[in-house]
Amino acid sequence: MIRHIVLTKFKTEVTQSEIDSLFAKLADLQNHLPGMRGFDGGVSVSPEGLEQDFRHGFSIDFDDAAARDAYLEHPEHKALGGQLVALLEGGVAGLVVFDLVINASS
């Protein structure tokens, strides 16, 4: 399994409603892409204060790298990704993406 983790720094003028709407559209992709399962997104609630202004994030689990790659190439993902980057502080600089292999035995 691949866990796709995305951390974001939204511009200060971006509303929570805009963020929620975008996250809902990303989550809906699981209804169209086999192997995409589980979308979780929201605001950080960490008491450590180490977010470095990456206050929102989401994670998506994929059955395997092929399912993740299909998501990355999907036209709707590309369109939503462009919308996401436009809302971020510094564009793509306001984004961290990390893909983690999750072993079934873990």
Image (cartoon, helix red, strand yellow):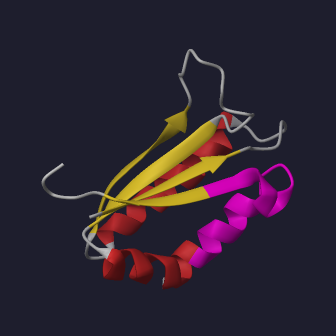
- Is residue 29 or residue 92 the one in the foreground? 92
Q: Is residue 66 above or below residue 82?
A: below
Residue at (26% x, 64% y) in the render: 1
Q: Is residue 51 above or below residue 10?
A: above
Residue at (58% x, 59% y) in the render: 97
Q: Is residue 31 above or below residue 88?
A: below
- Is residue 106 or residue 17 the one in the foreground? 106
**Residue 89 highlighted magenta (yes or no):** yes
Q: Position of residue 4 (x, y in %)?
A: 44, 59
Residue at (66% x, 45% y) in the render: 18
The magenta region covers: 78-96
- Is residue 72 or residue 100 the one in the foreground? 100
Determine which quarter of the picture holds residue 27: bottom left
Mark count: 0
Residue at (53% x, 58% y) in the render: 98
Q: Position of residue 48 (x, y in %)?
A: 59, 18
Q: Is residue 68 left or right of residue 64?
A: right
The secondary structure making up most of the magenta span is helix
Determine which quarter of the picture holds residue 53: top right
**Residue 73 highlighted magenta (yes or no):** no
Q: Is residue 74 left or right of residue 36?
A: right
Q: Position of residue 7 (x, y in %)?
A: 61, 47
